[in-house]
Image (cartoon, helix red, strand yellow):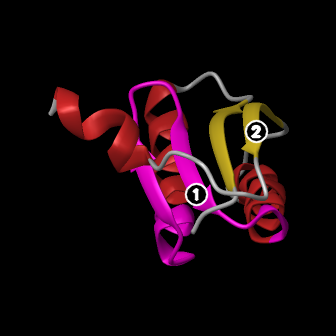
Amino acid sequence: MYTTSIAIQVLPDISEMDKVCVIVDRVIEYIASTGCNYMVGPFETTIEGDIETLMEIVKRCQEIPVELGAPSTKSYVKIFHNPQGLLTIAEKTDKYR
């Protein structure tokens, strides 16, 4: 049972669009490597898990762009936390696929 869902949009502060895409792809690769359930959307990636793990992922998503050459990064983060559980990504979106 998931207790937290986080949607994160990472915006590296870099003007070259090809570099932005490379950096965002690396952030998504990192998210995939965590083993958490996730779904990539056109503006943000949604991740499900426990709040402690997800907050560590959010932190790491800020560090990756800087390590890859962006002078800074901005992120928009939405958090839904419910200790009793929540609707999963699949429960919210499968009916539209």
Q: How many marks?
A: 2
Element carrying mark 1: strand
Q: Name which quarter of the figure residue 34 lies in.
A: bottom right
- Asked whether residue 25 is drawn in magenta, I would say no
**Amino acid type, residue under disc 1 in the picture:** Glu
Task: Please state the horizontal and vertical placement of residue 1, each as a whole percent of the image.
Answer: 57, 69
Residue 20 versus residue 47 in the image, above or below: above
Is mark 2 in CB contact (under 8 Å) with mark 1? no
Q: Identify the residue at horizontal 84%, vertical 58% (top origin).
A: 59
Q: Quadrant of the C terminus?
A: top left
Which class describes the residues within 10 Å of circle 1: few (<14), some (14-19), or many (20+)?
many
Residue 30 versus residue 87 in the image, above or below: below
Q: Residue furthest left?
A: 97
Q: Range of the magenta residues?
A: 29-52
Residue 79 versus residue 53 in the image, above or below: above
Which class describes the residues within 10 Å of circle 2: few (<14), some (14-19), or many (20+)?
some
Q: Identify the residue at horizontal 46%, vertical 67% (top origin).
A: 32
Element carrying mark 2: strand
Task: Please state the horizontal and vertical placement of residue 70, each as a whole percent of the image.
Answer: 74, 42
To which residue does mark 2 refer? 79
To which residue does mark 1 refer? 48
